Amino acid sequence: MHRKSRKRFAFSALTLLFALVGCDKMRGGGEGAAPGSQAPGSGAAGSAAAERDTILIGEFGSLTGSEATFGQSTHNGIVLALEEVNAAGGIKGKKVELKTYDDQGKTQEAGTVVTRLITEDQVVAIIGEVASSLSLAGGRVAQQYGVPMVSPSSTNPQVTQIGDMIFRVCFIDPYQGFVVAKFARENLKLENVAVLYDQAQAYSKGLKDDFVKSFTEMGGKITSEQAYTGGDQDFSAQLTTIRGTNPQAIFVPGYYTDVGNIALQSRKLGLTVPLLGGDGWDSSKLPEIAGDAINGSYYSNHYSDEEQRPEVQAFVQKYKAKFGGTPDGLAALGYDAAKILFDAIGRAPSLGGKDIAAALAGTKDFRGVTGVITIDENRNAKKPAVMLEMKGGKPAYVATVEPK
Ligand code: PHE
């Protein structure tokens, strides 16, 4: 009896400690590593993790800020996968647990919360981010500590070039740029296209270059290249210049909040040509912001909820039952990323970073919602892309483009 009460005291002291740590996190303070925590590259997480009775996975994402739906949708997808794996008994007899931090869409915060996931929470692996610039910031930390990270949806090539701990389950932007260029040339028969991109985002800059390269190689002409900085409110100078070059469409490889504002302002300036874009448009907020101004525009994405593949339809049904809305591409990719990570952990001989990374690298022909996923030698996935048209405020499926 005496022992039992001591144990209970120890337990509540621990609970209190966690509560305090939790408060600290809420304030966003306490950047330094806790004493006795893991040093970069020490691989200590494996042994610490082996002693836990659950498997702890970390997640970092933009749950607030101008890209908030990216983080929220991704989180929903991960939670769905988590519930499924635990309902099926967990992995190797252990339940899987998730620790999630909001990076607010900020680069510095991404680095801070990934450090915290590794040094304080001692996660065995990390899922995140969506925006490539944030995956680059968090990925450098994960690589340094030897903790595997799976980005569901960052498409900039540099993300997985960070090192052997960094993986993704989506296609990359040289392919996405090719898809949009091919669609513009062959389906829409366009010759003259202007470009307006976000110079502050690795994703937007890279995808702009990739599109321009493919489109000009296919015989198209870029009439004007203009830049903005995410969060800008006034795009009239760039749009007026673009209007003067008489393009048949404007390629806007940005994130949805800016794209919505650009759509509104371009229509106000009398620019009625379609806008073209990439996966960064993927948010229910886009038509909310832009209203009718976005209808008739096209973007590439990782999946469409209208696809008839059984993996897609089963996922859409489960998602609707749990969350009520139609899942976007982020939710599908979050789900796939989590499933692939759980599958890899199940095959890994231990919970050490090296073993999980090796198992991730061995992912082959995994039937995901967003396509069949094989991790290649550069830790990327080669998958088809879909083209969608905004119609009546909703993305409608137009075509699937298979990789060469
Ligand atoms: N691919 C984008 C990036 O790398 C992120 C994104 C993916 C946004 C899918 C929406 C949908 O920044």
Image: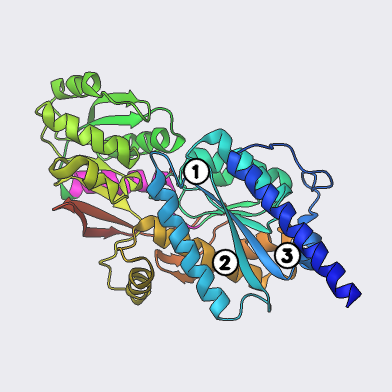
Residue 219, compared with residue 367, is above or below; it is above
Q: Identify the disc placed on residue 351.
A: 3
Q: Earlier in the sequence, mark 3 or mark 2?
A: 3
Is residue 171 highlighted in magenta?
yes
Q: Amino acid at mark 2?
A: Thr
Write the residue at 37% across / 73% down. 318
Q: Is residue 56 magenta?
A: no
Could you tell me how far apart the alpha carbons at marks 1 and 2 are, in whole angstroms?
Answer: 19 Å
Q: Which residue appears farthest toward the right when viewing the image? A: 2
Q: Quadrant of residue 59?
A: bottom right
For image coordinates 34% across by 62% down, the residue present is 327
As drawn, 255 above or below 247:
below
Q: Which residues are magenta?
A: 169-186
- Ligand 1 near label 2 (Cβ, under 8 Å)? no
Q: Secondary structure under badge 3?
A: loop
Residue at point 40%, 59% (across, down): 331
Q: Amino acid at mark 3?
A: Leu
